[in-house]
């Protein structure tokens, strides 16, 4: 079964997924086996690999190394074209719907096509929506876009729904990596209620309580990166 069909089936059953995000820029490749052993023993269902400022070539090597130790699906969550590697299983083909920078709405995607045509990666069209989180995140800096205001609820919901109407398969709603404040109940509930495609939530989730709240409010999948980077003991807390 394709990775997307599996995500869809899981979400339709009301079951929850957890993606552990590995940022090649912040990850020590020599620690891969130890880290992935922990991921395998945890409730994680997916491994996402990507970052905002990763050097050329690093992602492909890291994905191969991760693959040695796990059967979990490895999904690219690329901040740039250079992070696309055929070694992974799937790619979130992202469009930054919260911003108004054409490069990140469609420009980078067009540039990726020649690479994707030659690859066997499953591409999953994903509407990516960044919400402000109390501090400037890497995505804002790299894409030169402003995130959406938390108070602008209708605009957030309409943006997510515009993604669905455009035919996107997933909405990834997020506060940004290392966000001070994760997304609120009001935002997650409102977006979930409007959508009929699966909803991914990420950014600033650092406790089992916050994870379970995101699920309860409507996340089909939660993505956690920083909490694992800061302290691998977080695996035990889940
Ligand atoms: C970032 O949503 C992910 O794009 C994960 O965020 O690093 O804050 O867990 P954290």
Image: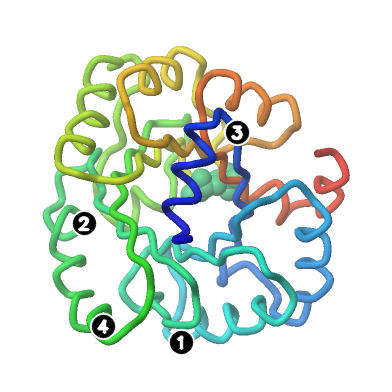
Give the residue at mark 1.
Answer: 57
Q: Tell me the SS state at disc 3.
A: loop
Residue toward you, 9 or 55: 9
Question: Which quadrant holds residue 20?
Answer: bottom right
Residue at mark 4: 115
Mark positioned earlier in the residue sequence (4 or 3):
3
Q: Residue furthest front?
A: 1
Q: Secondary structure at mark 1?
A: loop
Position of 186 compared to 65: left or right? left
Which residue is identified by label 3? 15
Mark in front: 4 vs 3: 3
Using the image, determine if residue 87 lies above or below residue 169: below
Among the two numbered marks 3 and 1 on one chain, the one whose residue lies closer to the N terminus:
3
Mark 4 and mark 3: span between their CA atoms?
Answer: 34 Å
Residue 113 on image: x %, y %: 19, 76
Marks 4 and 2: which is nearer the front?
Answer: 4
Marks 2/1 in contact by CB < 8 Å: the verdict is no
Q: Which residue is mark 2?
A: 104
Residue 177 visible in image: no
Q: Quadrant of the C terminus?
A: top right
Q: Is residue 224 left or right of residue 121?
A: right
Spatial CA distance of label 1 from label 4 is 14 Å
Q: Mark 2 and mark 4 in contact (Cβ < 8 Å)? A: no
């Amino acid at each position: 079964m394709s990775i997307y069909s599996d995500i869809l089936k899981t979400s339709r059953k009301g079951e929850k997924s957890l993606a552990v995000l590995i940022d090649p820029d912040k990850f020590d490749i020599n620690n891969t086996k130890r880290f992935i052993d922990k991921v395998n023993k945890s409730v994680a269902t997916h491994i996402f690999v990507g970052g905002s400022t990763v050097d050329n070539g690093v992602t492909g090597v890291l994905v191969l190394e991760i693959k040695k130790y796990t059967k979990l699906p490895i999904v690219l969550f690329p901040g740039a074209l250079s992070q696309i590697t055929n070694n992974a299983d799937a790619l979130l083909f992202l469009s930054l719907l919260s911003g108004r920078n054409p490069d990140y709405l469609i420009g980078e995607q067009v540039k990726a096509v020649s690479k994707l045509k030659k690859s066997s990666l499953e591409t999953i069209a994903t509407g990516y929506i960044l919400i402000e989180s109390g501090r400037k995140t890497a995505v804002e800096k790299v894409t030169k876009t402003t995130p959406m205001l938390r108070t602008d609820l209708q605009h957030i919901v309409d943006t997510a729904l515009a993604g669905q109407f455009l035919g996107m398969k997933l909405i990834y709603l997020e506060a940004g990596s290392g966000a001070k404040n994760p997304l609120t109940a009001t935002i997650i509930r409102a977006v979930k209620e409007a959508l009929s495609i699966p909803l991914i939530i990420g950014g600033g989730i650092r406790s089992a309580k916050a994870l379970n709240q995101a699920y309860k409010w409507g996340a089909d999948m939660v993505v956690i990166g920083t909490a694992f980077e800061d302290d691998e003991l977080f695996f035990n807390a889940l």
